[in-house]
Image (cartoon, helix red, strand yellow):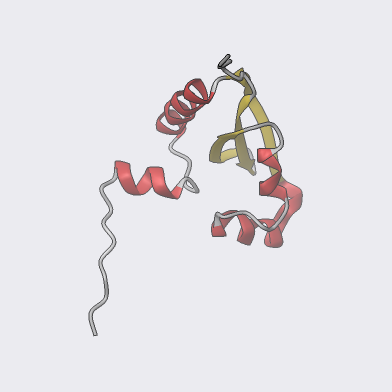
Amino acid sequence: MNMTIKNEYIIYEVSYMNKIIYIGMGEPGRELHVLSGKSNNPKLNELFFKDRENIKVLVIREGLTKDEALESERDFIMAAEPEFNIQHNQKNHKVKKFRKYT
């Protein structure tokens, strides 16, 4: 069995009014969710419907393996601290979700 490593992953950044608000990774085309209004990130969707003309998406790295992309994404997020990277911000700032008891 020939297992080849695919170098088909990208890192992309999303900026709004010249401020980086989100960094993501995936296969080419993944970045398009930002400008669809159908992202899994509710804040990106809200901004899309509010002011889509001022959202910019830029591929900042390409030709990466999945492991390289994951590592690079983490490094870029840690450096830029974009406010829309919800999971990263919760983990880094040790935000805990509390269950509401009724």
Extreme front residue here? 1
Identity of the residue drawn at 55% across and 17% down: 3
Q: Quadrant of residue 21?
A: top right
* Residue 93 x %, y %: 29, 45
Q: In this view, does 95 lie above or below 5?
A: below
Front position in the image: 57 or 100:
100
- The residue lying at 64 percent from left, 23 percent from top is 8
Q: In which quarter of the image is the C terminus?
A: bottom left
Left/right placement of residue 84 relative to residue 51 reads left
Q: Residue placed at 38% from the left, 45% from the top?
A: 89
Total marks in image:
0
- Percent x, y for residue 7? 61, 18
Q: Residue furthest bottom?
A: 102
- 80 vs 99: above or below: above
Furthest residue to the right?
53
Which quadrant holds residue 12?
Answer: top right
Locate residue 43 relative to residue 47 in the image: left or right.
Answer: left
Image coords of residue 56 (percent x, y): 70, 40
**On the rendered image, what quadrant is the N terminus found in?**
top right
Report x, y in % for residue 6. Answer: 61, 20
Q: Residue at x 48, y 41 (%)?
A: 82
